[in-house]
Amino acid sequence: MKVTSFRELMREQANAAVRVSGAHHSSWNGRFGAPIERQSDLGGTANWDNSISYNPRHVDERLQEMFRNARVHNQDRAELAGYRDAIRVVLHENVHLLSSEGREHSQSYNAMATGPGVRPLEEGVTELYSHQVLDDYIDELGIDQIAPGIKDVKSPKVYKEFTPAVEGFADMIGRKSGMERDEVIAAMAVVPADQKFTVAAAAMYDNSRLPGMIPEDQREQAIGQIAQAMSSEFGRVAKLPKSADAGTRRAVGEQAVIEGSRVMSRLRKQWQMPAPDRQVQRGVGSEQQRAGQPQRGDRSAQQSRAGVVTPPPAGPAALPPDIAAAARAGLTGSRPLGSATRLTADQQGSRRGGVGVPAQQRQGPETQR
């Protein structure tokens, strides 16, 4: 929807963010919280009651002026940069409120407050993604028609204490998963703060050998272990001194992915054999074994699960004597004698008996008394 007034922009801000990002929905409840103090450097906040607050000096007044000067060409570039930065703040707060199915922004409060690395990743991803799609957001709202030239100027990045670490983190995730950095950032941007490490861990997991080794019902637990390792390491970026340069901060993000990779290596060692439902069995024995196994819904299988011990499946049936003899001959490489004949029942027994002599029973050792 193309907006033509400040009021329309405020009403459409969340819907436009959802359309541009492809997120499931926005958690914004359509309300605005108390305005931020004018003297504050803070431009806006996504509040925990799912409302939004803006600083009038940074956002409201600039954008109201932009609409008063609508369609004026050759505006001062500094003024255009101010308009663009105000739109960036609006987008930034609305990215915070993007949510996955069944989740809301407010549900990540505890993770943001206490989870290691959660706030740095949330703020860094949100800021980088806001710059990444800002021109698309401007196009979606038709702001370039209101302020011609607004896409030709730049707006500064904030949260520079976090963004280098997020860039290093996203680059490493991309190398591990085959994704581009912008794709990784976009995937994390559309979920609440408490799910961002999980999304990154899932990208690594799903593009590795682990899905072929670990049963599907263990997938969530494995991804959780990877995410936890990355979260713990990434949290170090918040403890760096203010004097730490961008390279040092970026290295923290890269190391976080390395820690996640180490967990994946341990999981590979733990699950060396393929998952049972992915094993390939070959040979006559395996076919007979599968044939003897109870199928789903089989009563004997249900009894076994209920605690009733079922007997092991019977072994393969004995071969007839003549076929068995041929099989033994095949194993030894010799051909059976052409004169060999099959003995009748009254001819079998002790070799000491002659033809027609009843078979003698072998005597056991005498018991000494």
Image: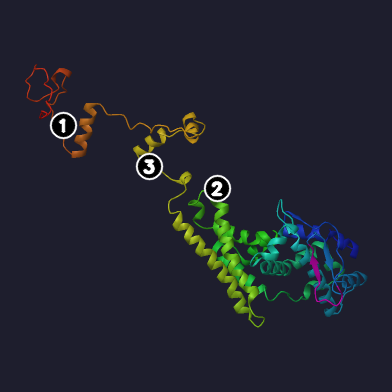
The stretch of residues the image draws in magenta is 37-47
- Residue where numbered disc 2 is placed: 217
Which labelled disc corresponds to residue 282?
3
Q: CA distance from mark 3 to mark 1?
A: 30 Å
* Left or right of 319 on screen, residue 12: right
Q: 306 or 200: which is nearer to us?
A: 306
Magenta stretch: dominant secondary structure: loop
Q: 143 or 111: which is nearer to us?
A: 111
Is mark 3 in CB contact (under 8 Å) with mark 2?
Answer: no
Q: Amino acid at mark 3?
A: Arg
Q: Is residue 284 above or below residue 267?
A: above
Residue 44 on the magenta span: yes
Q: CA distance from mark 1 to mark 2?
A: 55 Å
Quarter the N terminus occupies = bottom right
- Residue where numbered disc 1 is placed: 336
> Residue lying furthest front in this view?
369
* Left or right of 80 on screen, residue 294: left
Looking at the rendered structure, the number of numbered marks drawn on it comes to 3
Q: Nearer the viewer, mark 3 or mark 1?
A: 3
Q: Position of residue 347 (x, y in %)?
A: 13, 20
